[in-house]
Amino acid sequence: MHYDPRSDERPLPWDPFKSCTVPRPIGWLSTISPDGIANLAPYSQWQNLTFDPPLVMFAANGYPDGRRKDTVINAEETGWFVWNMATWDLRDAVNRSAQDFEYAVDEFEHAGITKADCIDAPAPRVAESPCHFECRYLSTQHFEGNSNVGNVDVVFGEVVRIHVKDEVVTDSGKLDIPKIKPIARMGYYDYTVIDSVFEMKIPGNEHAPAGLEGKPTLKP
């Protein structure tokens, strides 16, 4: 089958678009408003862009009534947002924090999770999560959609501090992904969990270690 997603009727009862680009990392993002209200919400359109320096992005669609997401507004107004790794053990809290709440609601409290202080960012992080990025806000690119929910803000940030719990690091110095069990977004209402890992090294690729070792390069 084939169809034009801009104009054609879907050939399936469920739109397959989001189920083709899978699995998608979850941007479980915490922010704080200028008046001190904490916010926490998951975004399935989240990704790293480069590693030297580490840059990230997330995309936040608008509400049906045209409002922008609190996460975007808070990041723009405070200059910070925080990524918290979403895991199998935290899946229910992630799902609860995805609900649409009034501005004054603290999603940390509703999701039943604990706040931990950041070092640079003013927003709290999820204490139960094994890994966190404190992200300095860089810019927002807005794209108009065919509807209010099609409108999207793409937010860019620079990771200025990384937190990793000691208990999720292997003896060889790598993250123990099968132990952490990160969850990822599929299409529909579906998720997946990462509980197995396999390795493939690119033949003859001598440049790979530059990206794997993660050592910062100082500009001349």
Image (cartoon, rainbow, N blue to C red):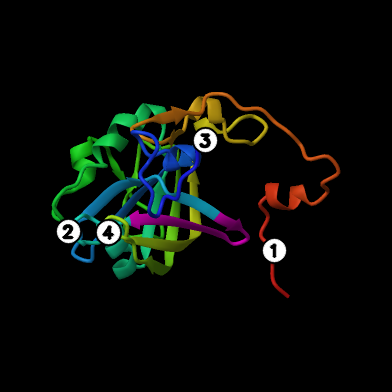
Q: Amino acid at mark 4?
A: Ser
Outermost residue on the right side: it is 204
Label 4: which residue? Answer: 147
Instruction: Find the distance from the CA under tag 3 to the CA under tag 4.
Output: 45 Å
Label 2: which residue? Answer: 65
Span of residues in magenta: 49-60
Instruction: Find the distance from the CA under tag 1 to the CA under tag 2.
Output: 45 Å
Label 1: which residue? Answer: 217
Q: Choose mark 3 or mark 2, whichever is in front.
A: 2
For residue 150, what is the image quadrant? Answer: bottom left
Q: Amino acid at mark 3?
A: Asp
Helix or strand or loop: what does disc 2 sit on? loop
| Up/down of 23 relative to 209, above or below | above
**Dot 3 and dot 2 residues touching (CB under 8 Å):** no
Label 3: which residue? Answer: 166
| Up/down of 150 relative to 179, above or below | below
Instruction: Find the distance from the CA under tag 1 to the CA under tag 4.
Output: 43 Å
Helix or strand or loop: what does disc 4 sit on? loop
Q: Position of residue 36 (x, y in %)?
A: 20, 60
Judged left or right of residue 23, residue 147 is left
For residue 99, what is the image quadrant? Answer: top left
Front residue of this view, candidates 97 and 122: 97
Rendered-image quadrant of the C terminus: bottom right
Which residue corresponds to the image point at 44% horizontal and 59% vertical from the top-left? 135
Instruction: Find the distance from the CA under tag 1 to the CA under tag 3.
Output: 26 Å
Q: Choose mark 1 or mark 3, whichever is in front.
A: 1
Q: Amino acid at mark 2?
A: Asp
Which of pointers 3 and 4 lies earlier in the amino acid sequence?
4
Q: Position of residue 53 (x, y in %)?
A: 59, 62
Q: Amino acid at mark 1?
A: Thr
Which of pointers 1 and 4 lies earlier in the amino acid sequence?
4
